[in-house]
Amino acid sequence: MSVKKHIPNVITLLNLSAGIFALIHAFNGNYNEAFSCVCVGIFFDFWDGFFARMLKVQSPLGVQLDSLADMVTSGVVPGVVMYKMLADIQENQPDYNLTPETFYMGIVPYLGFLITLGSCYRLAKFNIDTRQTDSFIGLPTPANALLIMSLPMILFDNQFEALSNLLSNPYVLVGISLFSTYILNAEIPLFSLKVKYFSWANNKIQILFMVVSALFLIFFQYLGIPMIILFYVLLSVITNNLNKGVKAV
């Protein structure tokens, strides 16, 4: 029995393990630890496919394992984090406490799990969509998870008082949840960050993105994460339009 065929699957299971730890921390309101665990999980998620291609051991089992692990790390965990953020607002801010007149607010925290539902649909669609072999259509679940996981980091960072006030509004968080659900499944082609060939010509967009992303993180820290996601979508749209223009010529 070849050991190398199990290497990518072990890496995928490490992704799932990180997601499980993130889930525990998220339920306990330990957002920093949950964020770190999700980052570790996404790191493993990047490399399992890389090693599967490098070792030439891609398999249907690996595809299914990858999606199931992503469902936890990048689907369930951000849903729980959004639920907890909304529940914390309801518990700690008198303006949003439940009263007979505002009984409907009791269901608001559960709207955070729209992110989980959207992630599940996106992962299932990805597995059967032949258009997404070399790129993505809709925001990948790991990118969306980082977007959601950055919100409590921004909320509790004293540098971003105006944004903290904004993220303390349940209607804003519900709006973000709805947007997240939409962008996960939107028909927007986005380039992939997975490296298949080591050359500037094949990876110049990815390299540009990584450099700009590093600068965002250096100068803006946690706020840089939503900026990176926005830049990712905008760069993809611009690249797609340029490529269409070249083909038209």
Image: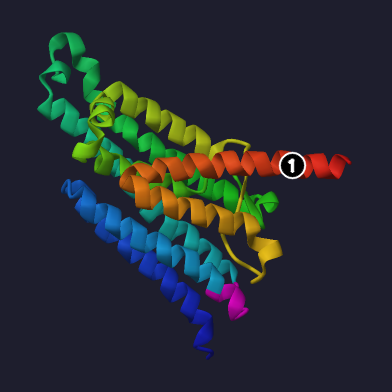
Q: Quadrant of residue 147?
A: top left
Horizontal and vertical percent position of residue 235: 60, 43
42 to 98, vertically: above or below = below
186 to 197, vertically: above or below = above
Any part of residue 224 in sight = yes
Check disc 1 and report the residue beneath it: 242
Query: In the rendered structure, which segment of residues is drawn in magenta?
Result: 51-58
| Direction from residue 242 to residue 65 in the image, left or right | left
Point 28% across, 26% down: residue: 166
Mark 1 Cα shell of 10 Å, populated few (<14), some (14-19), many (≥20): few
Instruction: Please tell me whether mark 1 sits on a helix, a strand or a loop.
Output: helix
Point 36% across, 48% down: residue: 219
Residue farthest to the top, as pictured: 101
Residue farthest to the right, as pictured: 249
Three-letter code, disc 1: Leu
Point 64% across, 61% down: residue: 203
Horizontal and vertical percent position of residue 17: 32, 65
Q: Quadrant of the C terminus?
A: top right
Tell whether position 24 is magenta: no
Horizontal and vertical percent position of residue 241: 72, 38
